[in-house]
Every structure is written in C-alpha cells, then in structure tokens.
Image (spheres, rainbow, N blue to C red):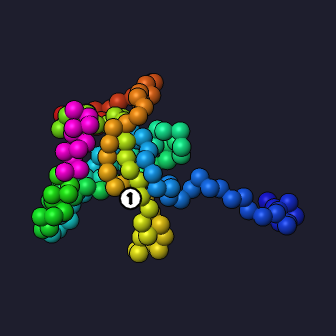
Amino acid sequence: MDLSKLLDGISPEENKEYGPLPKGRYDVAIEKITQRKNDTGWKALNLQLRVISETRKNAVLFDQITIASSSEEANEIGRKRLAKIKLLLGTAESDNWINKPVGVQVGVKFDDYKGEDKNVIWGYGESTIEHKAAPVVNAKFTGDDIPF
C-alpha cells in the first residue's frame, strides 16, 4: 500500500520515551541474571533491570558486574557492588534476587563504540516501593525447562 498521499507534509512524531533515561534514582526489579566470560579469564554477571517506579515505568536497564578479571580494582568494585545487592535483598543466592525491588542510581555516558549516549548504573540502594511479580498464568513447562 502506498501511503505517500496520506503522509504528504506530515512530520514524524517525536517519542521521548526512547533512548537513555535521564540521570537520577529509579526503583527497579531484577529480571534476569546471566554470566558472561571470555578467553582471557574475565567473568561478569549481567543484570537486566526493569523500572518499576512511575517515571519511565517498564524501561529496561542493564548492569555488567565484573566478578573475575586481571584487574584487582575491577574485581573489588564488582565484589562491593554484589555485596551491596546481597545486603539489600538479604541473600547471596542470586536466583532469589529475581523480581526483587532495589533502587539504582542511573547515569548517562557516551558510548564511543555505538556513538550514542547510554545508561550506566552508578550504584544500588533501597527501593522506595514494594513490587510483587505478576502471577504466572497457564504456564506450560517441558522437561527441558527443569534444570535437574
């Protein structure tokens, strides 16, 4: 379908809900935690975070926390960040962090590789709201879904 006549002279809408979040404090729920590693021995945990506070609700943020590298400073920063999350959530078992609320301090940094601004997590703190995960309805599991 040719929409040329319909769109003639129309300016594209501006959607300000995309792109990095403004710097500030947000309440988030930890949605997913995955491990990454490379051939040099570097290892990290990637956290996918969903904003649960009203400002930019449902926006997704990511944090990459180094857990092993050749840099002792990077290792220390990662351990301290994980210790803070453990303190906030009351457990070192990361599987129990899923869908739990925490506060994050978000910054904006220019990504030289992508050539655009991106969000960075500067730190973690207490959540100001209580978040309950949505119930799973009509879930179907196969034998492949069970890790044992």
Q: Position of residue 7 (x, y in %)?
A: 82, 62
Query: Which quadrant of the figure contains the C terminus?
Result: top left
Describe residue 117's horizontal placement relative to residue 103 as left or right.
right
Q: Residue drawn 32% across and 51% down?
A: 123
Query: Which quadrant of the figure contains the N terminus?
Result: bottom right
Q: Residue drawn 20% across and 55% down?
A: 78
Bounds of the magenta span? 80-90
Q: Is residue 14 above or below residue 94?
A: below
Q: Position of residue 120 (x, y in %)?
A: 38, 58
Helix, strand or loop: magenta stretch: helix
Amino acid carrying label 1: it is Val
Q: Residue drawn 37% across and 36% down?
A: 127
**Quarter residue 28 falls in:** top left
Q: Which residue position holds label 1?
A: 120
Q: Please say whether residue 51 is visible from this viewpoint.
A: yes
**Quarter residue 67 falls in:** bottom left
Residue 82 in the magenta stretch? The answer is yes
Q: Is residue 109 above or below residue 127?
A: below
Q: Residue drawn 17% across and 52% down?
A: 79
Residue 78 in the magenta stretch? The answer is no
Describe residue 56's horizontal placement relative to residue 41 as left or right.
right
Kind of element beneath mark 1: strand
Q: Position of residue 58 (x, y in %)?
A: 50, 42
